[in-house]
Image (cartoon, rainbow, N blue to C red):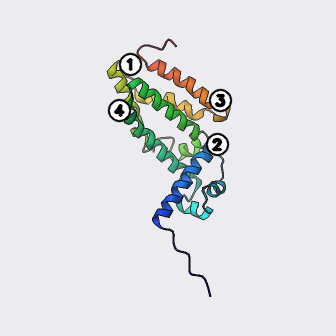
Amino acid sequence: MNPPPAAKPTRKDALSNRERILTVAREALAASGSASLTAIAKQAGVGIGTLYRHFPTREALVLELYRHDIQHLIDRAPALLAEHPPLEALRRWFDEVAHYGQLKYGVAEVIHAATNGGLDDEYYEPFVRAIGLLLDAGAADGSLKPGLDPEDVLLQLSVLWRIDPARGGEERARRILDLIVDGLRTTPSTA
């Protein structure tokens, strides 16, 4: 007699698997942009077929991580402004962007190709608006220069995606962000 067929996973199980895959993939790809999907599935405690059901290609997985992380950064700008003075909110936001840049380092080419070099990126304008929100708040309280262009600031931040985390990335990102913030302030830091 054959055993009864295994029950299909519930929607809750599928969502839990998806979230575990994303969590493990974020860490694995941050450690190495060449992390294998098989290793990610194994570490997430799912079969490779389950991973492929959720993310049929490596690109699909990378892009889902990108969407999630970029939306998180966009959402953080007004939250940080609600909690901190504008200059501090901007710096904290930049620090989060730098952390994301470290995660993006190994997979930047995939994101760049999938978004047509950013031209087809649905998150571009919302991300620029988030920068603008932070800059406008700083200009309003006098801590940042008025009339700063958020796209210019984004171009400055884009260097973060090129910093190799394995070669002093966090420290280098901190120094670069100090330079960027100092250039945006109405009165440069004396420290």
- Element type at mark 1: loop
Q: CA gap, disc 2 to disc 4?
A: 33 Å
Identify which residue is drawn at 57% across, 40% down: 103
Which disc number belongs to residue 31? 2
Dot 4 corresponds to which residue? 82
The kind of residue tagged 4 is: Ala
Up/down of 72 relative to 131, above or below: below
Q: CA gap, disc 4 to disc 1?
A: 16 Å
Identify which residue is drawn at 35% across, 21% down: 139
Q: CA gap, disc 2 to disc 1?
A: 37 Å
Identify which residue is drawn at 51% across, 72% down: 8
The kind of residue tagged 2 is: Ala
Dot 3 corresponds to which residue? 168
**Mark 4 or mark 1, which has the lower sequence index?**
4
The kind of residue tagged 1 is: Ser
Q: Are marks 2 and 3 in contact (CB under 8 Å)?
A: no
Tag nearer the camera, 3 or 4 = 4
